[in-house]
Image (cartoon, rainbow, N blue to C red):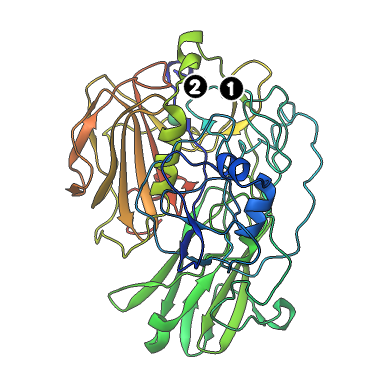
Amino acid sequence: MLRAMKAITVALFLPLLTLGLAHAYTVKKGDTLYSLARANNLKVEELRRLNNLGTESIRIGQELRLSAREPLPLTVRTPVPPVPLKYPESEAPVKPVSTTQPVSPVKPPAPVKAPVTSNPAQPARPASGGFTLTPPSAEPLPPVAAPPRPSTSNPGTASPVKPSPVKPTLPQPSATAPRPTTKPVPAAAIPVRSGSSFEVGGVSVALPTELSMGDAFIVKLSGKAAAQATVRFPSEIGEDVRQPNEVLTPFGAAGVYVAPGRVVLGKKTPVIVEIRVAQEVVRAIVPLRNQARGAVVALKLAPLVAKKLTDPGKAAEDEMVNQGYFARGAPLWTRPFVAPLDRPPLRGSFGQSRTYVAGGPVAYHYGADYPAALGSPVRAVNDGKVLIAGQFPVRGGLVMIDHGGGVTSLYFHQSKVQVHVGEQVSRGQVIGQVGTTGISEGPHLHLEIRVRGEATQPENWINRLWP
Ligand SMILES: [Zn+2]
């Protein structure tokens, strides 16, 4: 059964919106950091430093300063409309690091460690730049060799390495550096509450008592001032997650406000939650359950399937999906999530550690795989808006739905896609048919449910309003 399935997941990158730059250069179609650096006699690293870029991806319309005399761009967290921007294969996207929070001093890149294939407990998160393959039987590594980069491992290079979190290369503090809107309180001065329920500024807070990697969870806030509270997860700083430590405004429903959290696959340390209500700030620590990790599952992609990894459309596909992870908005659903198919997924398929080619790097599988007959109807897990719908080289027949609240669901490998971009879909609506398109070696649905771009256990959402 395992051999029959396949899927994949992918990597990231992330754009920061810039506003109001005087004398700045506006990114045009076809521009890359490399081309701009060349044209302006700069190094890519200088360009990144000048603009506080945690990633090498840039967007059409983004404003960049080309010299230190120009003001720094302000960064905002506004979701960016998807504008796929193509970059050369050698410029695989880098997972962005938020620059909207105070950033710790730049650290040198971690030394490359020995290959992790022999250590099932430590699957490498495929490089920030690449993508990760998924399904139960084989998924590949991008065979495209990229030039070595200091701060990120590339799944396509010959020697798998344990990825180190991407650290932003930032300019030294200066008067023009972006500042948080609220006054930072030194971490040591923030009181730490114990237990899973307590009060902050008159707001009652409820947290999970413990968590596991791959969990999605909520911070529940109730009380008059709950709508004014903000929540963030300082433990994400330095982790390989999109938009670490993002300041979240809880969503209200029926008098209860929630802020969704995620525990990235590979995490081993407790989750730290910070809640601010007016001037009062507290932190709480949620322990991580000790989990026995299964053995690494070695998949071997058939050459014809593996070949899709070098498809020239792959970079644009990855970038488009990554853009989708920046969707932020109020939740569009009011009822519990439902299963996409009548049959259950393969047990243990989510979060499985896999290699896709013999001796290749170990990667997590970001979705749950549902084996099913070709043509079986695939249903939307909840209400939402279609961000992506079509056939793509890697994910095959793909639908990506934005449910609001930073939650997206993705459906891979469909033989037919029956919705279109921009369409509002309702829970249980048929969106396509099970297939084996893209990097897949047998009919199945690969389902992902992501929180702000990070994969969470899909089964934990089914039949629940929140995970
Ligand atoms: Zn899969």
Q: Which residue is denoted by mark 1 in the rendering?
A: 144
The residue depicted at 79 percent of the width and 37 percent of the height is 112
Mark 1: secondary structure:
loop
Q: Nearest the camera: 417 or 392?
A: 392
Q: Quadrant of the C terminus?
A: bottom left
Mark 1 and mark 2 lie on one chain; the one further toward the N terminus is 1
Q: Is residue 305 above or below residue 329?
A: above
Q: 117 above or below 180?
A: above
Q: Disc 1 marks which amino acid?
A: Val
The percent position of residue 250, horizontal first and vertical second, equals 41, 72
Residue 181, image x and y in percent? Answer: 53, 79
In the image, is the residue at mark 2 within 8 Å of ligand 1 by its beta carbon?
no
Residue 48 image offset from top left, x and y in percent = 63, 52
**Left or right: 457 as drawn, with respect to 434:** right
**Residue depicted at 67% across the width and 47% down the height:** 42
Q: Left or right of 378: which side holds 266?
A: right
The part of the image, by quadrant, that contains residue 224 is bottom left
Secondary structure type for disc 2: helix
Say if mark 1 contacts mark 2, CB within 8 Å: yes
Q: Position of residue 338 (x, y in %)?
A: 28, 46
Amino acid type assigned to the residue bearing label 2 in the image: Leu
| Viewer-nearest residue: 186 or 72 | 72
Q: In this view of the protein, can residue 128 be seen by the observer?
A: no
- Circle 2 is placed at which residue position? 309
